[in-house]
Amino acid sequence: MKITIKQAKDYVGQVVTIGCWLDNKRSSGKIAFLQLRDGSGFMQGVVVKAEVSEEMFDLAKHITQETSLYVTGEIREDSRSKFGFEMGVQSVEVIAEAKDYPITPKEHGTEFLMDNRHLWLRSKRQHAIMKVRNELIRATYEFFNDNGFTKVDPPILTGSAPEGTTELFHTKYFDEDAFLSQSGQLYMEAAAMALGRVFSFGPTFRAEKSKTRRHLIEFWMIEPEMAFVEHEESLEIQEQYVSYIIQSVLKNCELELDVLGRDTSKLELVTGDFPRITYDEAIELLHKLDFDDIEWGDDFGAPHETAIANHFDKPVFITEYPTAIKSFYMQPKPGRPEVVLCADLIAPEGYGEIIGGSERIHDAELMLQRVKEHGLDPEAYSWYLDITKFGDVPHAGFGLGLERLVAYVTGVDHVRETIPFPRLLNRIYP
């Protein structure tokens, strides 16, 4: 019977076959320990010289790293391993021998590993990161489906920039200018007017080289938009969403978090209400902490966000930023138009912003005014302006960067480790 490593717990005492690769091995004179992986997990196979033929034991001792195999044996419990099970190997069949695999068990530099990202994904650490990433995606769909959201897919090729920026990848759509999407938000706002509560999940692009451990030129965004929802309710939904998916990881990825050495006590705090601090209060706090490089009206850099987040043990909302440094579509605060009803959710431990969101303008005259103030072409945004002309309502939304969240949840140092093939993009867009 052929099974996966993940299924081993259901076959204790039975003889099964697993298709796998050799991750590593060690041997003594009488026993060979094979570290096996099959994509679903990692497990040890034990080959005892006295229990197999001489040829089989010699084969087991000389299998090279990443050789593909069919391994047959009895599944048994193993209380010494985190996985809890191992195989008493009876036979090994080589499918394809791997020679001179470049990523050996020794230490390698980050650049070397990124250049070999297509192979580095096979490592136990990268396997754990991808499994956590997958659980965050699974839990995201579960949360939004259970809370009345409809998934809508915005286009990847667009005719305008949602943020009004020039940092876009330009292309031609036949005889028209087009850009790789920077965000699906504007389309999600239109969809919310049809479906009430919607979300998108897809790739977004920034045409600037990644120069920090927090940034990528391609990343994946979850972007919900909600009709008849104002700023405060949106913050509550963000709290519920982030708490839900992180608690799902704690429940379903215990082994992976252990492989990564993640201090889960910090993640266990991510539930319930998140602390909040206004932009005004944040500036005051930074001045008390002797940051003399920032004044009211400036945007925060990574050191500022980290200093603010260090005052809290869970993600913190920074609210009500100056209107001048935020996007054109954000709703001004009543009675104080110099700030907008927005919030950035900042993760602890120096991981920075994981969510940006706001209440959206729902007044036609004000929206047109803001489009012009930001130097945007009203004709190019005419379809978006239609939202405010035909039965617009108070509505709010936010965007969560998946890779930044994965970095925070897994505790990795660089966001590049959280996306399957980041360096390949640098070759396409040097």
Image: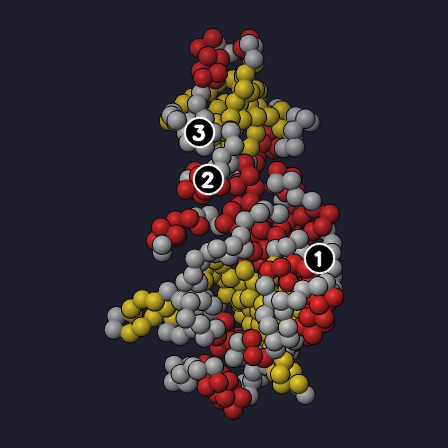
Could you tell me how far apart the alpha carbons at marks 1 and 2 are, in whole angstroms?
31 Å
Q: Is residue 335 left or right of residue 324?
A: right
Q: Which of marks 1 and 2 is nearer the N terminus?
A: 2
Hey, what amino acid is under mark 1? Asn
Q: Nearer the viewer, residue 145 or 121?
A: 121
Q: Residues within 10 Å of mark 2 (few under 14, many from 20)?
A: some
State the image coordinates of residue 424 (x, y, percent, origin top left): 39, 49
Label 2 sits on residue: 113
Q: Can residue 423 be seen in this view?
A: yes
Q: Is residue 181 left or right of residue 142?
A: left
Q: In which quarter of the image is the C terminus?
A: bottom left
Point out residue 345 in the picture as x, y percentages from the top left corner.
64, 64
Q: Nearer the viewer, residue 20 or 309?
A: 309
Cβ atoms under marks 1 and 2 closer than 8 Å: no
Mark 3 element type: loop
Q: Confirm whether residue 3 shows in the render.
A: no
Q: How many C-alpha atoms fall within 10 Å of the one at disc 3: few (<14), some, or many (≥20)?
A: many
Q: Residue 66 carries which label?
A: 3
